Amino acid sequence: MYGVYTLFSKEVLRFWKVAFQTVLAPVITALLYLVVFSHVLEDRVKVFEGVDYTAFLIPGLMMMSVIQNAFANSSSSLIQSKVTGNIVFLLLTPLSHFELFIGYIAAAVVRGFTVGAGVFLLAVFYVQVPVHSVVVIIGFAILSSGVLAVMGVIAGIWAEKFDQLAAFQNFIIMPLSFLSGVFYSIHSLPPFWQTLSHFNPFFYMIDGFRYGFFGQSDMAIEVSFLVVVTALVVLSTLTLALLKSGYKLRA
Amino acid sequence: MAADPAVSIENLHKRFGALHALKGIDFSIGRGEFFGLLGPNGAGKSTLINCLAGLVRPDSGRLSVMGHDVVTQYRRTRRLLGVVPQELVYDPFFQVREALQFQAGYFGLGKENNDWIEELLITLNLADRATTNMRALSGGMKRRVLIGQALVHKPPVVVLDEPTAGVDVELRQALWRFIKRLHSEGHTIVLTTHYLEEAENLCERIAILDHGAAVALETKSELLARGICRSLHIFASHKIETLPDQIRAKVQYINGHSMALRLRKDKDSIVSVLDAIRDAGIDIIDIQVEEDKLEDVFVQLTGERDERGV
Ligand SMILES: Nc1ncnc2c1ncn2[C@@H]1O[C@H](COP(=O)(O)OP(=O)(O)O)[C@@H](O)[C@H]1O
Ligand SMILES: [Mg+2]
């Protein structure tokens, strides 16, 4: 147990030591989006009944920050350890594949959570956001950052170079998170794009998370919950198998 | 259980694609032994060590540490092993003491282990660097931190993969002293090296690996006895000019008043060689016999000269 805790604290300390880049910078990015988009689109985009567009934006931007940073944490830590070779310090220890998994995921969830909370704390100065259910908000934040943390572990194990990881980030994580309804309600999209959005798991993360604030969403909250949990279970199972096999970690 | 050897290797095979890196290695290392694993670059020394450490997965064969299988009982064996990797790796995010504390933590050791970490810092001469970032250390210091990381959990079997490669003479001596001390305190030491001088100075028993196979496994003295040649240096009162043919064939060099002959231990008798030289009218004033060193045995066995030409 103490072994996992050590890995977790090391991983947290790793991003916290450079919190300027790993926490503050993404918070500021999200706030810039908020200011720009709300200013430009305030009167043009119709979202939920009785919900102000700027307020609507906040959960989306929070969730986008949460998932991007959870992914960044586990993937960048792993690829750095692999490239510099210091991954051996972990591989030489009695830590099991399950313990390695928990250590990396938990720290990435904390990073996602911290950035998300940072966005919220600063955004509420800008606009009033209702809170419908704290449990749903925290639950979706944890589950979604968990999914992305697991994806980060997969990407970190798979990638051999930083540019491969960047490709994963730029061609999978970024488009899926931007097209998941951060800036709009999918009901405002043409039918084709609406249908397509239903295949994007990130859409359910943001939609469920948004329900926690407004008590309304595009999908039923149960559906979103089920999709996110399923994604977490499936991807975790895959990742545990990868870690257990030693794929790309143990020659 | 107490009788189990420190390390036992049975018919170990490892392939990297088409490369057969370990071709059925078979030997064991006794508890408390100072064991040397020698071989030219690419012989498979690190691969063997990494199989033991769990960094490389063997294709077949069995490896155990104090009777515990390294694959099925890896939690036990990794606690028993302290491995100093060959590459000078470090985590640039952390300071020296942090690196040691995290490493101990992975083994489940918390604050109760801090005294030992402080002791390690002192022994490894790193105490004044405890709060220095790993990035800012010299190569020699990084090497010492690696050794410290391998010892944080007080493992009975210490494996060092080329610990003195690329370190200066002074640090090499210091590391030798330190490793000798670990050995005298009861640790089993497994050292890979391609500095033959190092193996000759330190190791009790030696395995020589070449192209993935063990070409010798003996005590140091047995191995040295395998040297089939020795050198005979002769110093004469006059310039050496004429020599009988059977002697001329053995000459390594002639340099004025002195010369060196290369003699086979099994065939050439020193006495008759000296007689023949005296009969040729050479007045011998001194002789010196030089037994082959480990390096020469090594060259005979592997057919390769150490690239650094120790
Ligand atoms: N991970 C790996 N993938 C492919 N080939 C490897 C790997 N590790 C080692 N080798 C090859 O196996 C052989 C033995 O290497 P190694 O065990 O490092 O030798 P040594 O430590 O004796 O110098 C070399 O030819 C090396 O290139
Ligand atoms: Mg090597």
Image (tube, rainbow, N blue to C red):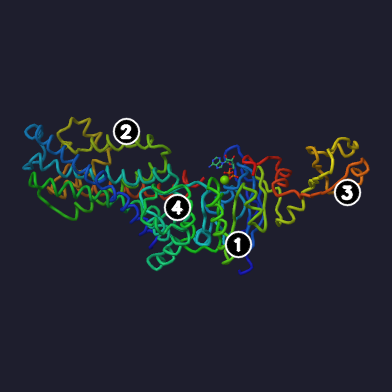
Q: Earlier in the sequence, mark 2 or mark 4?
A: 4
Disc on res. A89: 4
B206 lies above or below B245: below
How much space separates mark 4 and mark 3, taking CA atoms? 56 Å
Of tags 4 and 3, which is closer to the observer? 3
Check contact, mark 4 vs mark 1: CB within 8 A. Answer: no
Residue A197, image x and y in percent? Answer: 24, 36
The C terminus of chain B: image quadrant = top right
Chain on which label 2 sits? A
Q: Specify the amino acid type for callout 4.
A: Phe
Disc on res. B269: 3
Q: Does any portion of residue B36 appear in the rendered image?
A: yes
Check contact, mark 2 vs mark 4: CB within 8 A. Answer: no
**Relative horizontal placement of residue B235, taking residue A91 as reference (left or right):** right
What residue did someone put label 1 on? B6
What residue did someone put label 2 on? A171
How much space separates mark 2 and mark 1, taking CA atoms? 50 Å
What SS does tag 1 mark? loop
Q: Specify the amino acid type for callout 2.
A: Phe
Of tags 3 and 2, which is closer to the observer? 3
What SS does tag 2 mark? helix
How much space separates mark 1 and mark 3, taking CA atoms? 43 Å
Residue B76, image x and y in percent? Answer: 51, 62
Q: Are marks 2 and 1 on the same chain?
A: no
Q: Are marks 3 and 2 on the same chain?
A: no
Q: Specify the amino acid type for callout 1.
A: Ala
Determine crowd level at label 3: few under 14, some 14-19, many 20+ residues with C-alpha closer than 10 A: few
How much space separates mark 2 and mark 4, taking CA atoms? 31 Å
Label 3 beta carbon within 8 A of ligand 1: no
Q: Does any portion of residue A140 appear in the rendered image?
A: no
